[in-house]
Amino acid sequence: MYTNAPLAIPDSLVQALRQAQHIAILTGAGTSAESGVPTFREAQTGLWAQYDPQELATPQAFQRSPKLVWEWYEWRRGLVAQAQPNPGHYALAQLEQLVPTVTLITQNVDGLHQRAGSRNPIELHGNIMRTKCFAEDKIVTSWAETGDVPPRCPRCGSLLRPDVVWFGESLPYAALQEAQQAARTCDVFLTIGTSALVQPAASLPITAMEAGAITVEINPQSTPLTRYMTHVLAAASGAALPQLLQAVW
Ligand code: OAD
């Protein structure tokens, strides 16, 4: 699927990373592709092939068909639970030992960055392994297994839902503020494995560029961001990131 051909890393990028005091990183589904987690815009497989994720990941879909949406997330949780972090996740976690300040911002809900050792990723779109009450919007960690699908909130009896941001919903305010502050103040901004189609995450690399940061895109495909980037590494993150750390530190 991806070649491990040695990457041509410009010396100016090596120097910028070596001197960086603050590196901010935005990751998307591409960073988990080599862990076997389907990217968001890849075709759904099996039972779910007939559904468009954009039709399932909305509050309206949940209110219309709560059982179907809950079971879709249970299927995805199963996929994520079987997945393992890949060398790209581990390289990003290792970066935190090498650079004074690293801000990892992720659109992914799979928790693989944490499992690879990243200390405090900013989860812009939530985390599929967490559950919250639909009515209270508060995390629920345990509930009575009554056979109800979806299960019900032990506090108020409303339906439970995954703690992920659905289409049409706003991002967690504090997370977005922290991400935007990092984009404004970092020396280098890496955007990795994202199609840069979904706002406001896709604007973060532009905010960094406008604030004078060196910007780097790591993605086998080009995206709407590609032409603005200082550097573009057209490669898979699982192959490119270990090579990047090797070349710089
Ligand atoms: P997408 O599926 O839109 O894009 C995945 C990107 O990863 C594409 O640009 C691929 O070229 C790239 N890619 C694939 N394999 C890769 C690899 N091995 N290494 C590096 N890049 C690779 O996923 P996202 O951009 O993350 O939002 O989607 C952003 C948001 O759209 C998701 O968080 C989700 C969706 O709506 C919500 O759920 C709110």
Image: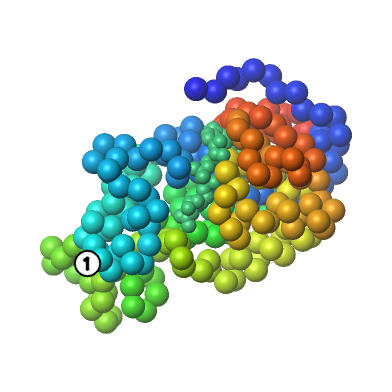
- Crowding near the residue tagged with mark 1, few <14, some 14–19, many ≥20 C-alpha atoms within 10 Å: some
In this rendering, is residue 68 above or below 92?
below
Q: Residue at x 53, y 66 (%)?
A: 171
In this rendering, is residue 79 above or below 124?
above
Residue 159: name its quadrant: bottom left
Q: Is residue 196 left or right of residue 210?
A: left
Q: Which residue is mark 1?
A: 151
- Work out whether residue 146 can be spotted: yes
Q: Residue at x 39, y 70 (%)?
A: 139
Residue 161 percent across, percent down from the top left: 32, 65
Q: Nearer the viewer, residue 152 or 53?
A: 53
Residue 218 percent across, percent down from the top left: 65, 36
Q: Residue at x 49, y 32 (%)?
A: 34
Q: Amino acid at mark 1?
A: Pro
Q: Is residue 68 left or right of residue 118?
A: left
Residue 177: name its quadrant: bottom right
Picture colour scheme: rainbow
